[in-house]
Image (cartoon, rainbow, N blue to C red):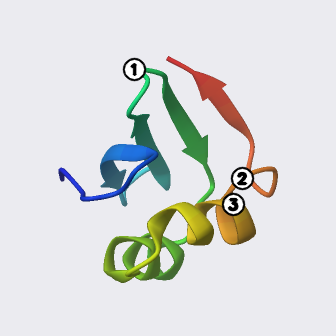
Amino acid sequence: MRVQCPAISQIDYRPEHGKLFVSFQDGDQYVYVGVPARVSLAFARSAAKGRFFQRIIRDRYPYNRI
């Protein structure tokens, strides 16, 4: 899903694997593993996605650059 955020351009969640895909405005793409559905939903609904990402997701879940 495309989002309106200065840092993040798109997010996608695959509940069957608990994978959260995050694309940034600079073109970097990452997949975060083991993200609960409730966290993904809260992220998608957040009005401040960049801040939510920094506080709740970044450095809290294993990730790989795509």
Q: Position of residue 17 (x, y in %)?
A: 45, 49
Question: What's the CA distance linking mark 1 and mark 3?
Answer: 18 Å
Do the residues bearing badges 2 and 1 touch, measured as CB atoms within 8 Å?
A: no
Do the residues bearing badges 3 and 2 touch, measured as CB atoms within 8 Å?
A: yes
Identify the disc placed on residue 27.
1
Nearer mark to the viewer, of 2 and 1: 1
* Residue type highlighted by circle 2: Arg
Kindly give the residue lying farthest to the left in the view shown: 2
Identify the disc placed on residue 54.
3
Q: Is residue 47 left or right of residue 63?
A: left
Residue at 59 percent of width and 44 percent of height: 32
Helix, strand or loop status at disc 3: helix
Residue at 64 percent of width and 25 percent of height: 64
- Residue 38 higher or lower than 10, as above or below: below
Question: What's the CA distance linking mark 2 and mark 1?
Answer: 17 Å
Q: Position of residue 31 (x, y in %)?
A: 52, 35
Within 10 Å of disc 1 (Cα), the crowding (few <14, some 14-19, many 20+) is few
Foreground pick, 6 / 16:
6
Q: How many marks?
A: 3
Helix, strand or loop status at disc 1: loop
Within 10 Å of disc 3 (Cα), the crowding (few <14, some 14-19, many 20+) is few
- Residue 52 higher or lower than 46, as above or below: above
Location of mark 2 (residue): 58
Q: Earlier in the sequence, mark 2 or mark 1?
A: 1
Residue at 69 percent of width and 70 percent of height: 56
